[in-house]
Image: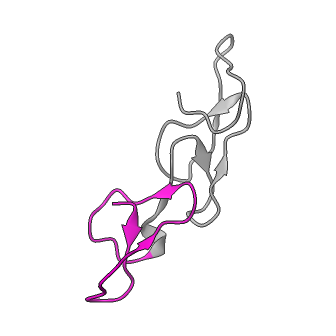
Amino acid sequence: AGNYSDEAGAAFCHPCPAFAYTHAAGSDNATDCVCNTGYTGPYDNCTACPEGKYKDALGSAECTNCPAGEQQGGAARAR
């Protein structure tokens, strides 16, 4: 997990792009990589959720506004 191999029988795997991860063994394409929690965007350009927003699921879903009174400083937050 966290890597993929786009060549059958390859001796090594490629890591996912920054802030991305694969959660399935045997991934065979970079598009199997998904953004980590706290990050959003396409697999090859994951960006941190801005301050005041969070994302606590893997994937490209948009970041959600923090509930009133629960805002934490900093970017790339998971709830």
Quarter of the figure with residue 6: bottom left
Estimate the x, y position of residue 16 in percent, counting from the top left: 48, 66
Residue drawn at x 34%, y 56% is: 23
In the displayed structure, would residue 52 be above or below residue 42? above
Estimate the x, y position of residue 4 in percent, counting from the top left: 38, 72
Estimate the x, y position of residue 10 in percent, counting from the top left: 31, 87
Residues rendered magenta in the picture: 1-29
Asked if residue 11 lies in the magenta stretch, the reply is yes
Given the current orientation, which residue lies at the most extreme top position? Answer: 69
Asked if residue 15 lies in the magenta stretch, the reply is yes
Relative side of 17 to 58, left or right: right
The colour scheme applied to this rendered structure is: one colour
Residue drawn at x 35%, y 88% is: 7
In the displayed structure, would residue 71 be above or below residue 58? above
Nearer to the camera, 65 or 35: 35
Residue drawn at x 53%, y 27% is: 79
